[in-house]
Amino acid sequence: MRKIILTALLTTIVLMNSCDILQQIEGMKMLSKCEFRIHTITDIHLAEVNLSGIKQVSDIKTTDLLQLTQAVLSNELPLRFKVNLQVKNPNNQAASLNRLEWMLFVDNKQMLDGVVNENFVTGPGETGTLPVSVNLNLAELLQDNQIEQLINYASGLADGTGKSTRVMVKLKPSVMVGQQSIPYPGWLEVRHDFTAQ
C-alpha cells in the first residue's frame, strides 16, 4: 500500500512539473508573437540632475550646471533612465518570461547591455509594461566631452531639444525549465524615434 501511495505521489509531482514546464515553454512561445514597442523613456538623470523639461543649457539651474561641469571634468557622467517596453499580447494564452537579456542602441550606437531577472506575464489580449533600468557612464561613450553636447544628447532622450533620438532595444527572453534557462532563438528588435515636443 505504501509503495502504491509513493508511486502515485511521485507520478503526480512529475505530471505537475511537466505541466509547469510545458506552460513556461508555451508562455515564451506566446511572447514571441507579442507586439513590442518602446512606450516611454522616463526617470532620466544625468549626474543626478533631473533632465525632465530641460530644453537647453540655459534652463538648467546654476547649481545643477556646476554639478554637471564637475562630473564632465572628472570624466564621470552617470546617465540613468528607464526604458518602458509595452508588450501587447494578441494571443488567447498568457505570454511570459523569467529572464530577459537586452542591448540598448542610441542613434545606432550600442550603449549598454544587461539582464532583467524578473518574472513577467501579460495575459491573453492584454497589454503589459516591462520596465528596463539602464545605467551608464555617458562620458566614456562619447568622444567630445563638451557639456552642452552631452546635455543635449542626454536630454534628447526625454524632451525639449527639438531633435530626434533613435533608440533600439534588442531583446532575448528566456524561461526557466527545471534548473535550466531556455533562451528564445535569436533577438527581438524594438525600434523607436523620440522627437522632442
Image: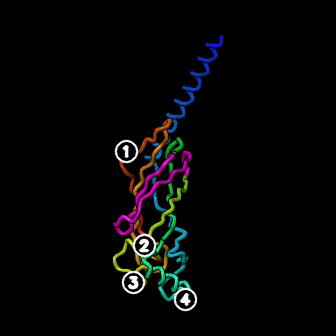
Q: Secondary structure at mark 1?
A: loop
Label 1 sits on residue: 185
Please tell me which residue lies in front, 6 or 53.
6
Residues at badges 3 and 2 in contact (C-beta under 8 Å)?
no
Judge whether residue 106 is colored magenta.
Answer: yes
Residue 183 lies, with reference to residue 68, above or below; the image says: above
Foreground mark, 4 or 1, reads 4
| Cα–Cα span, label 1 and label 3 | 41 Å
Foreground mark, 1 or 3, reads 3
Please tell me which residue lies in front, 183 or 47.
47
Q: Quadrant of residue 144?
A: bottom left
For label 1, the crowd category at 10 Å Cα-Cα, with few meaning under 14, some 14 to 19 and many 20 or more, is few
Q: Earlier in the sequence, mark 3 or mark 2?
A: 2
Q: Earlier in the sequence, mark 1 or mark 3?
A: 3
Q: Hey, what amino acid is under mark 3?
A: Gln
Q: Earlier in the sequence, mark 1 or mark 2?
A: 2
Judge whether residue 101 is colored magenta.
Answer: yes
| Cα–Cα span, label 4 and label 2 | 21 Å
| Cα–Cα span, label 4 and label 1 | 50 Å
